[in-house]
Image (spheres, rainbow, N blue to C red):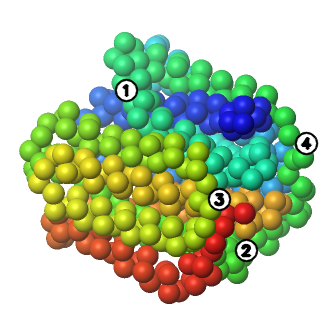
Amino acid sequence: MSLLDDPPFRYFFLGRLCSEFAFQMGTVAVAWQIYALTNSPLALGLIGLAEFTPTALLTFVAGHVADRYDRRRVIQVSLGLQALAAAFLAWGSVAGWLTVAQIFAMIAVIGAASAFETPAAAALLPMVAPEGKLQQASALSGGTWQLATIGAPALGGLAYTVAPGLAYEVMSGLFLASVVMSAFIRIETTAAPADPPSLRALFAGVAFVRHNAAILGTISLDLFAVLLGGATALLPIFARDILHTGPEGLGLLRGAPAIGALLMTAVLARHRIERRAGMRMFQAVVIFGGATVVFAESRSLTLSLAALLVMGAADTVSVVIRSSLVQIATPEQMRGRVNAVNFLFINASNQLGEFESGLTAAWFGTVPAVLLGGLGTILVALLWMKLFPTLRELERLE
């Protein structure tokens, strides 16, 4: 039976797909509108900060909420707030009174709501996945982000071209559709009550991760691998100055990792990793680093696209194994808080990875920066194999 034939997972998957499409559409519309209003590259850089700051401040509270209350309701409230924020942006755009400060305020609202939605959704996944299908469910759930990354920017750009308000209206509608999908999820059990609110309960996820070698190794590997190996922030430089292509080439480069990831998602959704799961994860990270090195040295658009496809595919293998391991190794009543820690690490690695890429490119040059990042990723994977032998020897994801 297909995973999508199972009603709880089907509605979960459709809800995630709608919310990911809404979010990715919003990134295009917001960036274009802010630059149109300010003509400031700094203002574009502040978008990520406005989104990340409330996420970082609220992550631990959000994890405790996901463990204390019905996760479906937490997701619905979070998505509802994001729908209202998008509706506000649509109203202001149509009426012509929307200011840059108001756009940043709504970005902060969406970031705060997302801080609650993401850990709750991650903790809900094992509850909707059919027994023995968690790896495939993790792959399909992650595939929603890849689908949105490929399709949503074009949809958002097209809607914004028709009218700025239309992009936000579609965004708000997709968030509301996700709320409806979440309401259709029927499961026999809900999250067990967590400890009463306290600082100890709030940071229990951090303590659990610190004392669990496999999860600590998994999360920290993701942090350092993404921190060192991220080359996407420098793609405009590669497109124009190294590969000598135009905007259409940049579009191909940006889409290649997502396409590679989506293809690997289709494979992992059909075929379980039956043995040596830990070693497969490390191998995937090494391949990711090697493909980054190839991309850094390439002067051919075709070879660069191939390297990015491999990077996307390898990253997906690593992500699916890591996310499945975190879910399996965490008690049900702790999943919200542990996934909140994981979410914070992922967000930090993505944000700081872009900063690291720009900083090292300014210091050493674009090609050496990406080359060093790829080699650093390989070294981190080899070092983590030594530091976390239990993770390396992990056999099955069950």
Instruction: Give the numbered dot on residue 154.
Output: 1
What is the CA distance from the residue labelled 3 to the residue labelled 4? Answer: 21 Å
Q: Which residue is identified by label 4?
A: 188
Q: Nearer the viewer, mark 1 or mark 4?
A: 4
Residue 216, quarter of the rendered image: bottom right
Q: What residue type is labelled 3?
A: Ser
The answer to whether 194 is drawn above or below residue 242 in the figure is below
Q: How crowded is mark 2: few (under 14 residues within 10 Å), some or many (20 or more)?
A: some
The answer to whether 341 is drawn above or below residue 62 in the figure is below
Instruction: Describe the element under mark 2 as helix, strand or loop.
Output: helix
Q: Which amino acid does label 2 sit on?
A: Phe
Q: Is residue 264 visible?
A: yes
Left or right for 368, reference 102: left
- Of 138 and 273, nearer the camera is 273
Q: Earlier along the polypeptide chain: callout 3 or callout 4?
A: 4
Q: Which residue is identified by label 2?
A: 208
In the picture, which quadrant includes the N terminus? Answer: top right
The answer to whether 46 is drawn above or below residue 39 in the figure is below
Instruction: Give the numbered dot on residue 324.
Output: 3
What is the CA distance from the residue labelled 1 to the residue labelled 2? Answer: 41 Å
